[in-house]
Every structure is written in structure tokens, then in C-alpha cells.
Image (spheres, helix red, strand yellow):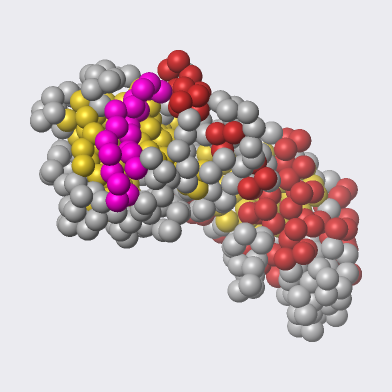
Amino acid sequence: MPFPTSLLGVSPPGSSARIRKGLVAYWPLDELSDGSAALVNRADLIAGQTMVDVGKLQAGPGKFGNGLSWPASGAARYLHAASTAALQSGNADFTWVFWFKLASKAASQGLLYKGTSASPEFTVSYMASSPTDRIFVEMCGSASYGGYKTIICNTFGSPAINAWHLCILYHDALNDVAGCSIDGGAPNTVAIATGVYAGSGDVAIGVQPVNANPLLGGFVGPLCKYNRVLSAAERAWLWNSGKGHPPIPTAPYKNLNIIFEGDSNVDGGDVSVYRNTLTWPYLLVNGLGYKLRGWAYEAAGGETVVQMIDQVATQMAGAYRADSTNVAVFLGGTNDLRGSDSAAAIYANIQTWCAAVRALGYSKIVLLTVLPSTNAGNPGDFETRRLALNALLAADHTCADALVDVAALCPNPDDTALYYSDKLHINAAGHARVAPVVRAALQALV
């Protein structure tokens, strides 16, 4: 999700607000698990440019919390993102910033790369030789190695193994110079009057194809790019005597795994809302103010509570995480009411579902009341049985930890401000109304 632009302000040099000025890409790389796409953060928080794995990367310690770990092997493992206008180089100001930690210096290793093997824009590598034991930068002013320049980071000297280092690579278009600073210190520079080649090649971390260097064995995270040159004070602020400052404060993690079960009023149930950023589960999660171990939809349109019970052993068990506090949020019963089941029978089935989920180890369960509907396909006694079911839930919901009366939030299915014309599914405005109330009930439990 893009980071709020309201936070990209201007403040005195060397401050957390000032350092966000001109930030055009930021990958926290704050991984949580080995290779699980649902549990890692390869996303760019500024523009939503997600990095893609080649090979399987692992979780490991990052400079700020978790990070990415590269196994020390020759297998092809790296991350890359397609080029965009914001990521291109060119004869303009830019700065790339990233933290890295080498596990070994036995061989040269690629750190950061932009371009293609035939036409690189720039590379940043650790070189075991030629030059010896140095961070080494290569830049090109045009395609096919035109205007080739190098920077050897002699001012800093030898990077230590098993220690975090901060690399800041920049191009100053006004002064026709490029430079590389390690650990916030004075940069080594090179004149580059033509600017840096603005190609369309990917950005890649952990590989350097130009000199066929071995892949990285170590750790990286985070990585970001600015469309300006950072001052010496800002470089020093980011380094912070080795303690570091992230360009954007890292959101805290909470050891929670939230699973949403139910029918089409959970997963969206409509092509204009289905499981995207308009659904109340998505809005709920992204309004928490912290990151989760995991969350998922197990809901599906048309399902009855009986079907959901049958799927506990597969879907809910499969979504369970042994390393987390597991929370189940449930909205079901509409499709049962569209059949002939009594309110008492549906209520008993909801209790059965809760007991089965609890037996899996889910420590918290949040139930939602059944929304009203005047859909033409409903039986004549739908509303009578719905009210009776909600009354049973209100009277006794001890099978769960909380009950949220979402029916009271969206009380009139004929209201097109909150419901679709089918008078069955809440629309985007309905989802937006439900999300904060369910979020508040969940947060009160965890």
C-alpha cells in the first residue's frame, strides 16, 4: 500500500520528516518467514512496486527488525523489480540507500544493480579482488557500456563481515558528479558529465551480472531511492553512529493471524468489490496500525454454515499458524436463511463451527450478526427467521469472544447508499461502515 504522501514533508536537516522528502521508492524488506508470499514484505511502500524473487530467499535479521537473508551458495537467488520512470537513472539527481551485511568476504558479491547485462546503468558490489576488499561502483553514461565510470570506496576502506553497513550512492546532476558513501562518511566521487544511462532494465538486489560475480551471501534491508541528493547531515542521520534510522519509521508487528470466514458479504461477493481494497476485512486489517503475522479470506459466496463446518478441518486448519495468536472472524447464515433451516438450527450450527475452530487452537472468535436482505429470491419468512437468529446470538454468544451487530450498521437493504441493487450484498460504502466497528471489537480482544 502506498505510504501517505502527507508524511513526506519538509523539516530541518537530519530529521525523520526531512529525510522523507523526495523519497520515491522504499522497500523495508522486513521479512517474516521463509518464502511465504503472504507473510513477507517485498512491497515498495511509496509506489507499490513489489519485488519478485528469483530463487527462494529466506527470512533473517534486518537492520530494523527482520530482513532478507541470502544463503551463501551459488544458487540463483535475488530480488528484482521492473523499471519505472521513478526508478530510472538519467541526467538528474538521485540517491540510492541500502543496508547490507556480508557473511563472508571470500568472494566478490553483487549488492545492488540497475540495468541489463548488456547495458547496465550502475552496479554496487563487494569486490574481493580488482579492487581488493572494497565496495566498488560501476556506472555508465549510455547504453552498451558507453561513458563507463568506476568508484572505489577507498575513503571507507574494508567492510567488516557480520556487521551492518550503510551504502549511499548518488548522482549530482548540477555538479556532474557521482559518489558513494559508506556508513555515513565522506564519499568517493567521479566526474560523470553525461549523467547515468536511463535504461529500462530492472532493479535487482543480491546479484551483479556485469562481471559474473557470485551472488550475495549475507543480508540486505531496507532499500530506498530518492529523486534528490542527500546532504552530509542527512547521510550522517541515516547512519546514526551505526544504530541507523529508517527513512520511514517501521510499523510494529503484532503476533496475530486473522482469518475471515463467511459468505459473499465477507469476501465481497461482487466483481467490483471481490477481495480487494474495498472489502471490510481488507479495510479492517489495513487500519490496525500494525503489521500481522498473517491474514486471509476463507469466505466464499453462497456458502452455508453447514458447509463452513465441513471445511474447518481443511480451510481453517490450513490457515492456522502455530507461531501466532489466531483469531477467527465469522459472518454466516444468510444462505441458510435463504433455505428452509430454522433460526434455532442455524444458531446451533454456528455454535458447532465455533467449537470446531476453538479445538484447532484459535484463541479468539468474533461473530457478526446476519445482515438484512429483501432480495427477490428470499423465502417469505427470511426476515422473521433472521431477526430470530440475531436475537439468539445476542442472548448467548459465549461460544465466541465478541459479537458485533453489523445488521444495525446497515439496517435497510433497500438503501442503495449501502447495498447493491440486489438488496443482498453491501456495497463499498457498506463495507467501509462495517470495517471500523469490527476492527474496534477485535482490538479490544487482542
In the figure, is residue 259 to the left or right of 222? Answer: right
The residue furthest top is: 241
**Residue at image point 69% right, 33% down:** 446
Residue plotted at (45% across, 38% down): 229
Rendered location of residue 16, percent (x, y): 59, 30
Q: Position of residue 273 (x, y in %)?
A: 64, 68
Q: Is residue 282 depicted above or below 42 in this figure?
A: below
Q: Is 197 in front, or is 208? A: 197
Which residue does the image show at 76% across and 49% down from the upper left?
Answer: 436
Quarter of the image where one finds residue 103 = top left
Q: Quadrant of residue 381?
A: bottom right
Relative to 403, is 66 above or below?
above
Look at the image and give the residue range highlighted in magenta: 176-196
Q: Which residue reaches farthest left?
A: 130
- Is residue 31 visible to the viewer in this orientation of the structure? no
Q: Position of residue 204 (x, y in %)?
A: 31, 47
Q: Nearer the viewer, residue 284 or 148?
A: 148
Whether residue 138 appears in magenta in the rendering, the answer is no
The verdict on residue 177 being magenta is yes
Please indicate whether residue 410 sits to the left or right of residue 169 in the image. Answer: right
Q: Nearer the viewer, residue 277 or 404?
A: 277
